[in-house]
Each structure stands twice: as structure tokens, then as C-alpha cells.
Image (spheres, helix red, strand yellow):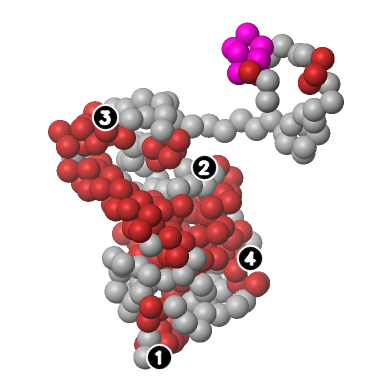
């Protein structure tokens, strides 16, 4: 390409040679306004209380919202780590996990598409397109899961606690392949980072180098009571919750839990 394309004064100036080139509109792109937090270090008060507020999705000021900037390098990871080291060790630990997952994917690139644990590579995951679609669209009948998925679909962002609830529900209660969820998140998240997405999905599925015990199955109802007891987050994203329009649960928690544990136990042998 011509070097003139990279000159600041020519970026917005039409040129005769550009006439035959397709525009973004020609390629099917439309203008979209994407709200993002300011590209600067989070307020000291947010970092100070991070360990106490990070798990409550209704609190919009409870997390740093720095994930998208760390993803694109618009905020210095070193400066943020220095701030965390000085103010809140929990935030520093979370950032260390981020680097760990990067290292893991670099050394084990196969884990992008298969379990790190060889014993977990041939599990008899279920194939149920209708239930998978309900999960994607936030129609599972479990409000915390549904609120998270709808926030993701509407904004390209999902609170971390809701990510845990949604991921756990897919890989355990529905017992579907974690790669389905990883792929869906990759298409929706504005802060998508392959190493962190893969690492956290494998952690949730119990298949990773460092993972939650495979027999641990989080209860969506228990997480709801613990992290959004007043349903403030749920009501923001699921307005029909509490009415006849809200769907019944697509799977019973106890049934889904026992099914997943039994299948994983047999599949690991």
C-alpha cells in the first residue's frame, strides 16, 4: 500500500485512487457506538474496595472495568499492577492469573480447543441445540444466568460473577462442551482475550491445568441469593422476571448436577 495512507493529513482526505476501493459500508459494516470506560487507571477508591465489591454485579462501581483496556493495551498493565500492589492485593492476584493463562496457552496451544487434562478430553458432552440457544439468548429460567447472557448480548460485556454463573451452568447443569461457550464468548466480548477466555472456561469445566474440582457444581440459585439477593442486577436485564412471561428452568439443578458428575466420573476412567 502507498505510504500516503499512513500520513495523518491524508487519513480523512479522499484520493482518486480510493474511488475503486470498497468502503466499510460496501462491506456490510454499520456505525456502532460502543460505550467503554475511560482509558485511564481506575479511581483509587474503586481499587481500595475491590476485594469487597467485585462479586456483586449490580454494583457498577464495584470493579475496575479495565479488562477491555488491558486487552487492547490502552492502559498500561504495569501501571495497573503497580497500583494494585500498593492498594489491593486481590486485584494484583487477578492480574497474575491473567499472565498465567497467557503463559499456559503459549506453551500448550492445543488447549485452545481441547482439555489440558488428558482424562477430560473424551467426555460424552450433550448436544441439545434448543437448550444451547436458550443459554445464548438468556432464556434458561435461572435469572442470574439469564441476566448475564443478556448483558453480554446487549453490551459486549458481562460482569465476572455472571460469567462464572453462566459458564458453570453450560458445562455442568447442561453438560455441554466448554468450547461451545468459549466460542460464543469470543464472538460477543469486547474484552475477549483467547488465553484468558480459554483458561477460565477450562477452569470452570474442571479440564484445565488449574481448575475447579470436576465434581464441583455451582448452584445458580445459591449464587443468586449470595451475590444479587435483591434481584437488582436481574431486573436491569430481565424485565419480565417475576411475571408469567419468564420461562421455567430448562433443567432441574439437582438433576443436572448429578448427570454431569456421573458422566464425568465415568468418562475419566
| Distance between mark 2 and mark 3 Cα atoms | 22 Å
Q: Residues within 10 Å of mark 1 (few under 14, many from 20)?
A: few
Q: Secondary structure at mark 4?
A: helix
Q: Horizontal and vertical percent for residue 225?
A: 35, 61
Q: Residue furthest front?
A: 2
Q: Earlier in the sequence, mark 2 or mark 4?
A: 4
Q: Which residue is mark 4?
A: 133
Residue 79 numbered tag:
3
Residue 138: quarter of image: bottom right
Q: Dominant secondary structure of the magenta stretch?
A: helix
Residue at x 52% of width, y 42% of height: 190
Residue at x 24% of width, y 43% of height: 91
Q: Earlier in the sequence, mark 2 or mark 3?
A: 3
Horizontal arrangement in the rendering, residue 169 relative to residue 243 (left or right): left
Q: Secondary structure at mark 2?
A: loop
Q: Residue furthest left?
A: 86
| Distance between mark 4 and mark 1 Cα atoms | 27 Å
The reply to whether callout 2 and callout 1 are in contact (CB within 8 Å) is: no
Range of magenta residues: 4-11
Amino acid at each position: 500500500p502507498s505510504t500516503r495512507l499512513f500520513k495523518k493529513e491524508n487519513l480523512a482526505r479522499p484520493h482518486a485512487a480510493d474511488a475503486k476501493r470498497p468502503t466499510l459500508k460496501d462491506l456490510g459494516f454499520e456505525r456502532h457506538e460502543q460505550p467503554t470506560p475511560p482509558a485511564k487507571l481506575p479511581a483509587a477508591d474503586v481499587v481500595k474496595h475491590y476485594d469487597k465489591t467485585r462479586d456483586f454485579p449490580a454494583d457498577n462501581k464495584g470493579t475496575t472495568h479495565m479488562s477491555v483496556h488491558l486487552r487492547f493495551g490502552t492502559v498500561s498493565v504495569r501501571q495497573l499492577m503497580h497500583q494494585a500492589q500498593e492498594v489491593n492485593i486481590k486485584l494484583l492476584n487477578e492480574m497474575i492469573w491473567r499472565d498465567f493463562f497467557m503463559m499456559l496457552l503459549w506453551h500448550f496451544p492445543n488447549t485452545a480447543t481441547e482439555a489440558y487434562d488428558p482424562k477430560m478430553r473424551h467426555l460424552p458432552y450433550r448436544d441439545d441445540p434448543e437448550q444451547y440457544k436458550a443459554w445464548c439468548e438468556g432464556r434458561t429460567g435461572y435469572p442470574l444466568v439469564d441476566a448475564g447472557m443478556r448483558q453480554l448480548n446487549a453490551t459486549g460485556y458481562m460482569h465476572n460473577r455472571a460469567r462464572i454463573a453462566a459458564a458453570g451452568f453450560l458445562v455442568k447443569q447442561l453438560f455441554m462442551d466448554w468450547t461451545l461457550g468459549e466460542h460464543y464468548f469470543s464472538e460477543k466480548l469486547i474484552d475477549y482475550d483467547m488465553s484468558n477466555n480459554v483458561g477460565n472456561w477450562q477452569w470452570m469445566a474442571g479440564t484445565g491445568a488449574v481448575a475447579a474440582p470436576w465434581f464441583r457444581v455451582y448452584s445458580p440459585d445459591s449464587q443468586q441469593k449470595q451475590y444479587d439477593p435483591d434481584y437488582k442486577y436481574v431486573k436491569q436485564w430481565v424485565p419480565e422476571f417475576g411475571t408469567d412471561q419468564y420461562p421455567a428452568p430448562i433443567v432441574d439443578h439437582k438433576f443436572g448436577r448429578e448427570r454431569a458428575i456421573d458422566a464425568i466420573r465415568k468418562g475419566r476412567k
